[in-house]
Amino acid sequence: MLSSRRHGADAHVRTPHRAGTGARIGALVQSAAALLWIAQAALLALAVQRLADGAGLDAVTVPALGFLL
């Protein structure tokens, strides 16, 4: 933001904006979402592999419930 108190050569210099708490919280939420996606992908792969091995519905119930969380 330009400061109206500056005069002369420094009048055009902007004060650097620091990342606030909101940006840090956003980064934390984004990281948590990425980690959650990895766990969901693993559960989905496990369920698909069990179905490919010929297991029944009871073998994929737990991974399916974990995926829904």
Image: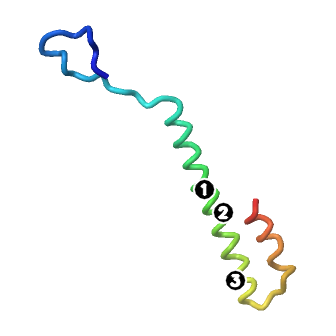
Residue 10: % across, % down: 17, 15
Residue 29: % across, % down: 59, 45
Question: For the residue carrying disc 1, how many other residues have a C-alpha within 10 Å: few (<14), some (14-19), or many (20+)?
Answer: few
Q: Amino acid at mark 3?
A: Gln
Q: Amino acid at mark 2?
A: Ala
> Residue at (26%, 23%) from the top-left corner?
14
The tag earlier along the polypeptide, 3 or 1, is 1
Determine whether 20 is above or below 55 in the image: above
Label 1 close to label 2 by CB (< 8 Å):
yes
Question: For the residue carrying disc 2, how many other residues have a C-alpha within 10 Å: few (<14), some (14-19), or many (20+)?
Answer: few
The tag earlier along the polypeptide, 3 or 2, is 2
Q: Nearer the viewer, residue 55 or 5?
A: 5
Give the spatial CA distance, label 3 vs label 2: 15 Å
* Left or right placement of residue 58 versus residue 40 in this view: right
Numbered circle sitting on residue 35: 1
Q: Nearer the viewer, residue 9 or 36?
A: 9
Numbered circle sitting on residue 49: 3
> Residue at (61%, 63%) from the top-left corner?
38
Numbered circle sitting on residue 39: 2
* Left or right placement of residue 10 versus residue 36 in this view: left
Give the spatial CA distance, label 3 vs label 1: 21 Å
Which secondary structure lies at badge 3? helix
Residue 55: % across, % down: 81, 87
Q: Amino acid at mark 1?
A: Leu
